[in-house]
Image (cartoon, rainbow, N blue to C red):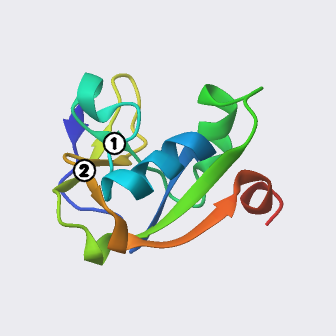
């Protein structure tokens, strides 16, 4: 994965997650998601990318939420990286997500209909 030199000019990033995974984070006081332990980072996307991310990774799953994140509040390192074979950069958080960076939690359907 290649890191880009200049991050896109956005302070709002999104993360799709299962309701149960989000609820577990409330007990643990931090969000680790499904990928931090296995991939080393948490996948995020921009509002413009959310539909494509849903289509590639979440089609057919129900009870999904979207976390709206204020990237300026993050305490773990955020890197914008392009997956292998792509020139589209995605934000990746290299550490747990501190809950005070989450400014809104909405059902995925709400985001997809915007």
Residue shown at 53% from the left, 60% from the top: 67
- x then y, percent, for residue 44: 43, 49
Residue drawn at the location 50% of the way across and 41% of the way down = 21
Image coordinates of residue 73 in percent, x first then y, are 27, 76
Quadrant in which the C terminus is drawn:
bottom right
> Of 1 and 17, which appears nearest the observer?
17
Q: Which one is in front in this view, the residue at disc 1 or the one at disc 2?
A: 2
At x 60%, y 28%, the residue is 57
Residue 104: image x %, image y %?
55, 72
What element does badge 2 sit on? loop
Q: Is residue 77 above or below residue 33?
A: below
Any mark on residue 96, and which?
A: 2
Is 88 left or right of 61, judged from the image as shown? left
17 sits to left or right of 70: right
* CB contact under 8 Å: marks 1 and 2: yes
- Dividing the picture into quadrants, the one containing residue 3 is top left
Alpha-carbon distance for marks 1 and 2? 8 Å
Q: Which mark is residue 67?
A: none
User: Which is more toward the observer, 22 or 13?
Assistant: 22
Say above or below: 47 vs 41: below
**Can you name the residue that lies furthest to the front here?**
27
| For residue 79, side relative to residue 83 (left or right) | left
- Mark 1 closeness class: few <14, some 14–19, many ≥20 residues within 10 Å: many
Secondary structure at numbered mark 1 = strand
Front residue of this view, candidates 59 and 21: 21
Q: Does any portion of residue 24 appear in the rendered image?
A: yes
* Residue 10 location (% of width, % of height): 41, 72
> Between disc 1 and disc 2, whose residue precedes?
1
Residue at image coords 58%, 61%: 47
Q: How many residues crowd around disc 2 within 10 Å: few (fewer than 14), some, or many (20 or more)?
A: some
Q: Quadrant of the N terminus?
A: top left
Residue behind mark 1: 42
């Amino acid at each position: 994965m290649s890191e880009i030199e200049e991050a896109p000019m956005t302070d709002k990033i999104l993360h799709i997650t299962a309701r149960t995974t989000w609820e577990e984070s409330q007990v643990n006081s931090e969000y680790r998601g499904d990928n931090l332990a296995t991939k080393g980072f948490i996948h995020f996307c921009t509002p413009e990318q959310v539909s494509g991310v849903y289509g590639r990774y979440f089609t057919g799953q129900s009870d999904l939420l979207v976390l709206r994140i204020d990237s300026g509040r993050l305490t773990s390192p955020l890197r914008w990286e392009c997956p292998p074979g792509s020139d589209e950069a995605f934000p990746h958080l290299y550490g747990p997500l501190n809950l005070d960076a989450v400014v809104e939690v909405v059902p995925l359907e709400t985001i997809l209909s915007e």
